């Protein structure tokens, strides 16, 4: 297992981060326990969750994943120091979480305490903002004209960000969290948080997790370059594009119990003919180079310059083993050329 520094923090994390968002819907406590035990025994020391999980998000599944991790920790308290535990405060828009309101300083304080209680731990290593208060070009809003940057009140949002940092500072000083990170944000968001932290001597953002995969490369090169030179760890989520890059949804297939067989918030972001055609091409490239489609996608993601630790999730231990094996693969120049040929043909299929 390879390890990388988590931005400007003082900790090293495995290049594989174990995602947990299906624990509580597609996976039960026993499944999660098995995945955690296997991951730790294999050298993974980084686990990511969120107060919003499990997914698809709902009032009924809210907090379930943290509770499942907390149950494991309650049974294995001596193992808490073996891994870096990351969680996230949900952004606005979900009526069952703070009535859908913005992230505020007060919300940070109460949500940290609630997460600590569910997780049955005294501290969270990395606490992240799941998405910003302003509408950002994420969750399928990345096409020009879908949102307006000029409609954002810059000073208002900067003031909100300062209030958030001050609350995070209180949590750091209280020993409840160690480091702070972002998710689903932009270069301006990263740089404004850094500017405010430096100006007011507040905790510095050490990481950002954004969607990044062969079907969705919008963060390359500008945001990732920003991360490299600002020493902010870049953590791709959904490296398999919601599982579609595994090939299991090709030509309309919907395996029983799979994510695409369940209701999705805002519809199936990636369910269209162009995506299907792109995945067919990647499937053929994987076969040519003796890889599974999932391993091709994950190995590609891991080798991108600037990527720190990739967040993977699995609904069973067999999938987890297959996905983890991808990080021991080195893509040949021929494989990369074949991948790039498909990528140029389908640069942004959803």
Image (tube, rainbow, N blue to C red):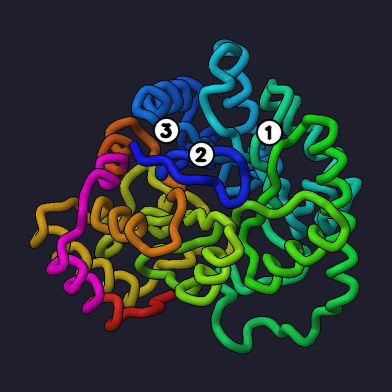
Residue 253 at least partly seen:
no
Mark nearest the camera among 2 and 3 is 2
Determine whether the residue tagged by mark 3 lies in a helix, strand or loop: loop
Q: Could you say which disc has been placed on residue 44 in the image? A: 3
User: Which corner quadrant holds the C terminus?
Assistant: bottom left
Residues rendered magenta in the picture:
324-341
Label 1, residues with CA under 10 Å away: few <14, some 14-19, many ≥20 = many
Q: CA distance from mark 2 to mark 3?
A: 11 Å
* Label 2 sits on residue: 12
Mark nearest the camera among 1 and 2 is 2
> Residue 342, percent across and down?
24, 76
Is tag 1's residue or tag 2's residue first in the polypeptide sequence? 2
Residue contact at pointers 2 and 3, CB within 8 angstroms: no
Residue 221 at least partly seen:
yes
Q: Quadrant of residue 39?
A: top left
Q: Could you say which disc has been placed on residue 124 in the image? A: 1
Depth check: give the residue in front, 22 or 46: 46
Determine whether the residue tagged by mark 1 lies in a helix, strand or loop: strand
Depth check: give the residue in front, 31 or 16: 16
Depth check: give the residue in front, 55 or 85: 85
Who's the residue at 20% across and 58% down the image?
331
């Amino acid at each position: 297992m390879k390890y990388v520094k988590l931005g400007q923090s003082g900790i090293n994390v495995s290049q594989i981060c174990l995602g947990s968002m299906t624990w509580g819907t597609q996976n039960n406590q026993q499944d999660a326990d098995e995945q955690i035990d296997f991951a730790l025994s294999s050298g993974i020391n980084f686990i990511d969750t969120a107060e919003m999980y499990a997914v698809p998000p709902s009032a009924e599944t809210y907090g379930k994943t943290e509770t499942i991790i907390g149950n494991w920790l309650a049974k294995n308290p001596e193992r808490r120091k073996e891994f870096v535990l990351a969680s996230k405060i949900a952004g606005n828009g979900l009526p069952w979480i703070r009535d859908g309101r913005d992230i505020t300083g007060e919300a940070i304080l109460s949500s940290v305490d609630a997460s600590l209680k569910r997780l049955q731990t005294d501290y969270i290593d990395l606490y992240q903002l799941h998405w910003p208060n302003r509408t950002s070009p994420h969750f399928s809003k990345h096409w020009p004209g879908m949102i307006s940057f000029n409609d954002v009140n810059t000073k208002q949002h900067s003031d909100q960000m300062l209030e958030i940092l001050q609350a995070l500072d209180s949590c750091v000083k209280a020993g409840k969290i160690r480091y702070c990170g972002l998710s689903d944000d932009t270069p301006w968001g990263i740089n404004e948080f850094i500017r405010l932290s430096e100006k007011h001597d507040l905790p510095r953002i050490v990481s950002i997790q954004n969607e990044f995969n062969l079907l969705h490369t919008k963060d390359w090169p500008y945001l990732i370059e920003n991360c490299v030179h600002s020493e902010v760890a870049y953590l791709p989520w959904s490296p398999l594009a919601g599982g579609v890059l595994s090939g299991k949804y090709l030509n309309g297939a919907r395996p029983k119990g799979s994510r695409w067989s369940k209701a999705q918030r805002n519809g199936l972001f990636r369910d269209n003919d162009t995506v299907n055609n792109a995945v067919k091409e990647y499937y053929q490239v994987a076969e040519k180079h003796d890889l599974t489609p999932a391993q091709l996608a994950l190995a590609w993601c891991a080798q991108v310059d600037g990527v720190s630790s990739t967040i993977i999730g699995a609904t069973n231990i067999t999938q987890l083993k297959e996905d983890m094996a991808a990080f021991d693969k080195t893509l040949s120049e021929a494989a990369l050329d074949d991948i790039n040929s498909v990528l140029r043909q389908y640069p942004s299929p959803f």
